[in-house]
Image (spheres, helix red, strand yellow):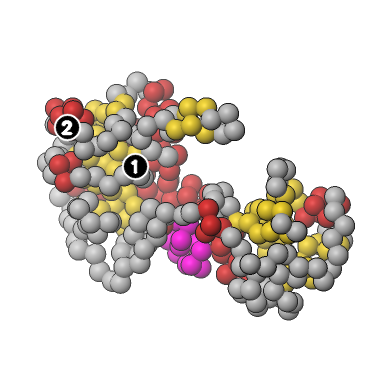
């Protein structure tokens, strides 16, 4: 099958790899433009581009996907199908209508739940126990197209957005190949989405701010859901501190108050329960254990993290 692949981050790489291994004809890869990253603002290619360069696949990086020149170039390929995995931009109708078999999207949720750009993160933040992958035929709406196949997986208690993302990227690759085989055989047919939709908008830096007045399990889910980006953070004496890994501990305390700071244990009071900090990252420092953090500071029990 002649396919054009749209994808950008590392999440999309397993799906592209699976297509190649299954013998599909990847005529071109469309990915977003290179971005400047790091302190030195070095121009860096997206992971899908790096993967494609190593394998000699034709790469297209349009600044504007509605550009007539790009649309003409895409049309000349005459793709039978377009596969979209975390490309990061909404496709215009000119592209959606181009391939004979349509545009097939690999989405990291069990639609119609968590439509949008950050389904993995919001599923964890919301305390979901299960997530999964949906393959669907794209339409002009935001993840509103008909479902082709779905596969669910458990969200482990120690999963964060990074670990769950890796699991779902592999599951997505598996389900994509299963979907394409089913389409070829005529055994997979699109069905309308059923159920009440929910939405997962792009995360902003402010979404990582910890509100210690919330219940411990809510804070625990937030910290997992925003790791590694934007990262959970709070303030202590006006210093911004990132909190990377925590445990929920039974007990009671006052929100924002340091209830214990010794014997390698740093416990913070919340609106319901206690949070034990496992890994913490002071401003301008590398991540460290709570033990290392306490060794470098004389924190007093009963003092408070900064309140809003």
Determine the residue positioned at 15% across, 42% down: 94
Q: Secondary structure at mark 1?
A: loop
Q: Is residue 265 above or below residue 26?
A: below
The span shown in magenta is: 120-132
Determine the residue positioned at 66% across, 59% down: 234
Q: Is residue 194 above or below residue 30?
A: below
Horizontal and vertical percent for residue 112? 31, 64
Q: Nearer the viewer, residue 245 or 100?
A: 245
Of label 2 and label 1, which has the lower sequence position?
2
Horizontal and vertical percent for residue 59? 31, 26
Answer with the quarter of the image where residue 151 lies. bottom left
Image quarter hosting the N terminus: top left
Q: Which residue is mark 2?
A: 68
Q: Is residue 191 visible?
A: yes
Q: Nearer the viewer, residue 183 or 141?
A: 141
Side (left or right) of 14 relative to 142: right
| Structural crowding at the residue carrying mark 1, measured as other residues with C-alpha within 10 Å and reported as few (<14), some (14–19) or many (≥20) | many
Q: Which residue is mark 1?
A: 87
């Amino acid at each position: 099958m002649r396919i054009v692949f749209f994808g950008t981050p590392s999440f999309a790489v397993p799906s592209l790899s699976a297509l190649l291994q299954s013998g599909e004809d990847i005529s071109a890869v469309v990915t977003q433009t290179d971005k400047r990253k790091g302190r030195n603002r070095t121009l860096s290619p997206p992971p899908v581009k790096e993967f494609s360069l190593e394998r000699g696949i034709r790469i297209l990086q349009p600044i504007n996907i509605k550009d007539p020149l790009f649309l003409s170039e895409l049309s000349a390929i005459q793709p039978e199908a377009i596969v979209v995995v975390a490309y990061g931009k909404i496709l215009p109708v000119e592209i959606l209508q181009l391939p004979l078999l349509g545009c097939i999207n690999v989405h990291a949720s069990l639609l119609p739940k968590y439509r949008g750009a950050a389904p993995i993160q919001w599923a964890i933040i919301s305390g979901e126990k299960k997530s999964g992958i949906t393959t669907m035929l794209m339409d002009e709406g935001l993840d509103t197209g008909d479902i082709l196949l779905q596969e669910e997986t458990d969200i482990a208690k120690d999963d964060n957005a990074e670990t769950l993302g890796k699991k779902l990227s592999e599951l997505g690759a598996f389900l994509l190949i299963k979907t394409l085989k089913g389409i070829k055989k005529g055994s997979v047919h699109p069905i309308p989405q059923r159920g009440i939709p929910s939405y997962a908008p792009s995360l902003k830096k402010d979404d990582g701010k910890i509100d210690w007045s919330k219940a411990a399990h809510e804070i625990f889910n937030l910290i997992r859901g925003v790791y590694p980006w934007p990262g959970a953070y709070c303030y202590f004496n006006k210093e911004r501190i990132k909190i990377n890994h925590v445990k929920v501990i039974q007990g009671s305390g006052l929100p924002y108050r340091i209830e214990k700071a010794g014997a390698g244990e740093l416990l913070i009071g919340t609106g319901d329960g206690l949070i034990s900090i496992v890994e913490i990252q002071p401003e301008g420092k590398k991540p460290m254990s709570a033990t290392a953090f306490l060794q470098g500071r004389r924190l007093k029990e009963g003092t408070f993290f900064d309140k809003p």
